[in-house]
Image (cartoon, grey):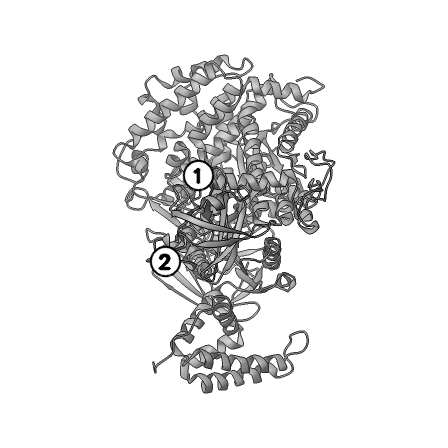
Amino acid sequence: MTTNPDGARLVRSLRQARPVLLACEAIGWLHMTGKANQAFLLHHGGIGVNYDPNDWHQALSPDWSTRIGWVRSGAGNLTWPHALVEFLTKYDEGSSQASTVGLLQAAHAMASGIEKNLPKSISDYLGQDATHMWLVSPFGHPVRNLVADPPPLHGSRGREMLLDRVGRLLDELGRLGSTPPGDAEPWWTWRENAIGENGWLRELFLCTLAETRLPNNDVTLWDQSYVAAALFKAAVAGAALVGATNWQDLKRRTQWRILIVGFGSSHYEARAVKIGDWAGARRDINAFFIEVQRFIEVDLAVGALVYRDDETLAFTFPGRRQDATQSDSKGSLDDTHAEALHAEIEKCVDELARSHDFETPPICHLSSKSTRSFVGMTAGLRQVREELVIPLHRVWQMGSGSEQKGHVCPVCGVRFNGNTRSPLSDNARKQSVCSVCARRRKGRLDDWLLSGNDTIWISEVADGNDRVALLSFSFDLEPWLGGSHVDTLRAQSIAEWRRFNPVLGNQDNPVKPDDPFQTLTASVESKVARFNRNDPLLSSLQEGYRHETNWPEFFSKIVEDRAEAPAWNALDDSQRARWIVHQLFRKLPSPGRVYRFWRTAEEFFDQLLICFRELSAAHPNRWRTRRLVVTPDSASIAKKWLDRETYSSVWRGKPIDLLYRDHDGSFVTISNLARCFDAEEEGNELKGKELLLIGDNGPAQTLAIQDVETPGGLGAYSPVVPLDRSPERFRILVPLDCATLCVESAIKKWRSEFGAVWDRMPLRVGIVAFPRMMPFQAVVESARNLEAALHERKGETWRVSESHTRNGVTALGLERHRSGSEIVLVPTSLPDGRDDVFYAYFRVEDRTLRNPRDFQHPAGQVYRHALDLRRGDGVLVEPSDVAWVFMDTAARRFEPAQVRPLSDFQRMQDTWTLLTRRVPSLSALRDAWSELDQRESAWRDSEGRWLDGGQAAWTDLARAVLGRRLGISGAALETLVEAAAGGTLRWSLEWHLSLLKEKVEVNHGE
């Protein structure tokens, strides 16, 4: 390469190589297509089907080589295989190919992870048979039995359909590649149709497996294929830029960097005055992110997206060879040229941001180290987020907008609003926004007018009491992406491996069945002084071991590449042995699995959105989800109505909001009509009526209604407003009267799908209940405060009080760190009846190994299977919590959040159910609680702490008052007393009586 790199020249080189780079990406998508066949599953399921997944291409006509033969002339400095079909037949061969196939081999090996690299005879016991051929989530939840319940891909015409679509994909690729278009848009369309969010290839490959063996059945064919393609594409891009690639030993030596683009979305959320400000900004930010994707993935074709959240995008990027030095890059992209390309990319990303008139700059970050894993990606994401905390983290020249005078815009705070001679009042002029912020609001409205299936209006979300709930659900995904929580998962149990492999080669297995971890570690320690590639123990644990020549290099690939671990030279033999054993038996944060973590978390929230739409739209009055178009009479039409302005009025004593549309002179309703109409009414009741309409800033005007009809595309809607959805957080506005069902549904789904890892994948729920007219800025600030309070909670030690197992589920009684207890159900068996020795492990507080399934991290943390926990064991739990606030005033956002264990939400509901069944009247319930509330206030100090003996005395009083005033006794009384002492009774009454305004049916002697 040149000694003085020119970033612009590197960008031009990538654009010239675009057809070949995108063709290589497509090769990566398709290289395992043979596994997308029912015969592949049956072959590994013991049915006796003889099937070779590498022969699938033989059914293509024209054949594979003919269809992609044009790539040979696309980039002169690349070395292609003798036969292009080698991409499909040699991608998983042991020996590295001295061509671009070698880069695919490296990408494939990195994507799938080394834990699957076990000798077949040793790992046969991990196989699934055809009766139970399960696809599971990366968190251990069974998703589908692919043989008993085959997806359409494995149906009678599935293979024929797949091959037909693959053929058309390659034909279109060939057409674009042979006569490359001048811009990237046709390529983007081609790519999105295949692998976008609704891409046909993505949908087909998501429903089947790349590996059938346990526990690698947690990664789909799509996960492995896509990530391998992303890595292959970046590696070929590096080779195209270098021009003098070293084609030897590519499979072992190829490495990658990660390119991260960040943008401070939270700043725009915090500045939003109205919901339209944030929704409009979010729309522009999403458009910017898509443009960045198009630029990186298609225009330059230098890599592919491997992670995205609400503020960051991460892409694969060419790396430096493992054996490269500062003076010799060994034919790979050195640091100097990588930085020059990065700087040019940053300039282009800045221009994309300026085209949206953003007030703050993006960040473009390139990892300083080349690696063979995504472990370092988390540190890069964290660094970018820390920089984004300061909105103007570097010098940024933005567009000033068209206005040069006026007041400062109340939203962005950096532009003038130009409102100097408006007839509006001075206060109204100050509230006017600049042209950029106005455009963002308008863009959101434009999108709604085109679809309208979801609403954008809080007035349509509000329930019958004119109240709304902002629900926030969040995960802490970083420990999974970074690999620290993957430490808790097993690729094999040492005890199970020993049980099924008593003999290794022709020698007895040296590992003792009653103490497998310690004896295995000791055995490995005895071998690290001298490398023996024929050692039967280590050869049985890792297929690649016998191809290595020394310990440091083997350690580098097995340990240093896949974990944040010390280097070989920094450890003694005992520590080295512990790291080797840990890495060989743990699941690994392989790129394919990390990608699946991201997508699974997103999918969880996507499915919640579907559920919440259904729950919020279920109402006995059909007007809950309907709209009307109101046509004014001629006199009203002549009045000065503002196009797309919202107007408020009152009809039948209930609020009704309308939006004016100038193109046809009509109004469309944008409020909850179930408050105005009975279910049996037709809506014609508005005909001939007059409404006094008040706009945002103008004077009140009378609207005389001539006609009413149902609108076309805007006729029905789901009363929810999704605000954010990333893999780590989901925010949505729902009617307050639906919030309970929504939260319960989310908890139920989380317990079902994350039950095996509930202690490491906590669900945190924030609930902000507020009246419709509450300023949106205050609502969002309150939500942020709740989320901050929820994430302040760190891991706690909970104590096991009991353990019972039945039908493959272990019920653990746990005493919480703070107070109270709960029962947790942990799935401990697989669908085929075998013990789940892969997922259901807890971090325990002791540092001694007690059971054969126990294992220990090199740093000392001991992990114990759920089946082996005993009374008194302390387990580390990252608690799932819920925090809520009712914003009857905007000042509530400044009050400390009420944080409670998530399980208390169901206790709160159960308490209310008990009350509704047993209390004699609502007034009796209110009187009883009023007395208790007064006494509680008197027996606490000014900071809310109980006075000496106050809590015990108050609990006794609660028993007496509840029994006397409500006529409750026995177990029901004790349940209510316990709820009162724990604060659950107060929460239940506030939630159901104050927030939801529910009523209690009179008890007639149940």
Callout 1 crowding tier (Cα within 10 Å): few <14, some 14–19, many ≥20? some
Q: Nearer the viewer, residue 517 or 452?
A: 452
Residue type beneath disc 1: Leu
| Badge count | 2
Q: Position of residue 353 (x, y in %)?
A: 63, 33
Q: Nearer the viewer, residue 490 or 57?
A: 57
Residue named by callout 2: 621
Observer-side mark, 1 or 2, equals 2
Q: Position of residue 949 (x, y in %)?
A: 61, 84
Mark closer to the chain start, 1 or 2: 1
The mark found on residue 118 in the picture is: 1
State whether residue 492 appears in this view: no
Q: Nearer the viewer, residue 45 or 952?
A: 952
Q: Position of residue 220 (x, y in %)?
A: 41, 39
Look at 54% across and 83% down and name the residue there: 931
Q: Nearer the viewer, residue 760 or 807?
A: 760
Tell me how far mark 1 sits from mark 2, CA to CA.
61 Å
| Above or below, comparing residue 403 to residue 686 in the picture | above
Q: Is residue 357 left or right of residue 118?
A: right
Look at 55% across and 62% down and name the residue there: 884
At mark 2, the secondary structure is: loop
Rendered image quadrant of residue 62? top left
Q: Is residue 42 left or right of residue 388?
A: left
| Quarter occupied by the N terminus | top right
Residue type beneath disc 2: Asn
Callout 2 crowding tier (Cα within 10 Å): few <14, some 14–19, many ≥20? some
At mark 1, the secondary structure is: loop
| Quarter occupied by the C terminus | bottom left
Question: In the rendered structure, are the residues bearing label 1 and label 2 in contact, judged by CB atoms less than 8 Å apart?
Answer: no
Rendered image quadrant of residue 287? top right
Look at 58% across and 62% down and name the residue there: 887
Rendered image quadrant of residue 443? top right
